[in-house]
Image (tube, grey):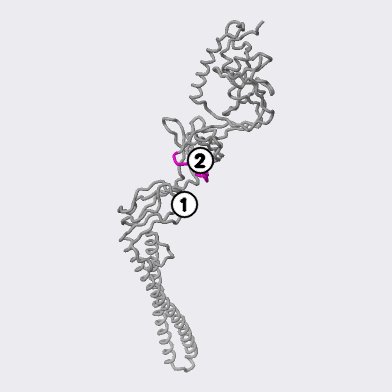
Amino acid sequence: MRDAFVSYPSGKHPKRTVRWGLSLAGLVLFSSVATVHWVHAHEGHGEEEAGEFDLDAPRIVSSQTAKHIGLQVAEIDTQPLEEILELTGWVEPLPDQHRDVVGRVAGEVTEVTKQVGDEVKAGEVLVRIDSPEFARNLYEVRKIEVDYQKLQLEIERSGAKAEQAGAEVEIAKIEIAYAQAELDRFRSIEGEGVAQKEVARWETEVARDRGKLRLDEIALTTAVRETEALQGQAKALRLSRQALMVLNNIDPGADVDQQLTSTYEIRAENNGVVVSRSVRPGQWAEPGQVLLEVADYSRVRVVGELPESLIHRVRDRQSDKVRLRVAADREFLGEGAIRYIAPQLDPVKRTAHLFIDAPNPGGTLRGNMWVDLTIVLREVKQALVVPRSAVVIMGPMHFVFVKNGEEYVKQDIVPGVTDDQFVEVLDGLVPRDPVVVQGAYSLTHLKPKKAKK
């Protein structure tokens, strides 16, 4: 008898990852295959049946039957394994990287430079609008600029007056000090025959100088307040000018005197791709109307559905990396990072939204695309594993078939971590055991037989 046999080199298995869940399509396929194998299990091959159907009894399979059911055997070994959680998510642009292109003035659209799907660079002109309102705003900008310059001259004059008043205050203080000194001197010698009229004259001089000082201080205060008021007006004018320039997308350094036009240009605020366009030349655009939508997909957000029963396992690994794949191409795309888990659950599905930020330099991930997410929950450095196709599950039982000479013997196992291809064996097998890796389900439907006598 010749059985199909496949062996794996010891210690050279690639690192595997765990996948949660079993697809409905897989169950249907297994059901169909099992039905076919059950039919063939009753085909006679010139061998004597061992008796009543006994799952624990050894099987002996002819080469013809082994070929028909695709029977394959492999020696098992240890390898690294990861327990993973697999979810499905969809792609969204990051909120701050999806922008609406809107106009701030009313007018007739004369040109739209981009179509849906076109790439956009920050600063590029996207839409041009012929707007009388824009022309009026340009006039206001120029008028404000002229008024601002006039105010600057007034501020200079007022500042000069304040400086002059300040100087006069200092002079008045000096004159008062001199007059007071003379008054004090004559008072000190008044009893020695000095005429009292000198004392009276210096008293008058001190009073006059103090009055002048008061007037100079008032003039200084007035000049300072006038200067401050003019500076406030200039600041208000400058802000009004800046607001009008921002409103009309005018470069702050541009010479508005040279822009004698009513053409209003709307420029891109960020890099990206035009994802929608709702305007064409000849249409009238209103302020605030969305004309285009530009989205930057160099980084995206992937939203997954996390079952309530697994939130606690993912929450402890928050900020971990998440592997990404798309259904159309199972090749590994890259990694994203868990940003946060939504605090509320869907009341019907009992799932929470899992938000993942991911780089997308090649643009493979597109808006609303379905993405397969892989989150590592636990890592096993060395695990004794068998292919998933080798394990038969019946209720709580997990078992495999081990080749012993010409016989295939049922062996119960204790499974551990499971990924999309392999199952960790905690008990029941040892390395180098020859295990049926393909056709195990078919063996369960073959009645035990004895070799020909």
Residue in front for this viewpoint, 43 or 8: 43
Residue 291: mark: none
Q: Earlier in the sequence, mark 2 or mark 1?
A: 1
Which quarter of the rendering shows the C terminus?
top right
Q: On the rendered structure, is 230 left or right of 15?
A: left
Classify mark 1: helix, strand or loop.
loop
| Mark 1 residue type | Asn
| Mark 2 residue type | Ile
Residue 177 in picture, x, y percent from top left: 48, 83
The reply to whether residue 222 is visible in this rendering is: no
Which residue is tagged 1? Answer: 271
Residue in front for this viewpoint, 134 or 161: 134
Q: Residues within 10 Å of mark 1 (few under 14, many from 20)?
A: some
Which residue is tagged 2? Answer: 356
Classify mark 2: helix, strand or loop.
strand
Residue 117 in picture, x, y percent from top left: 43, 47
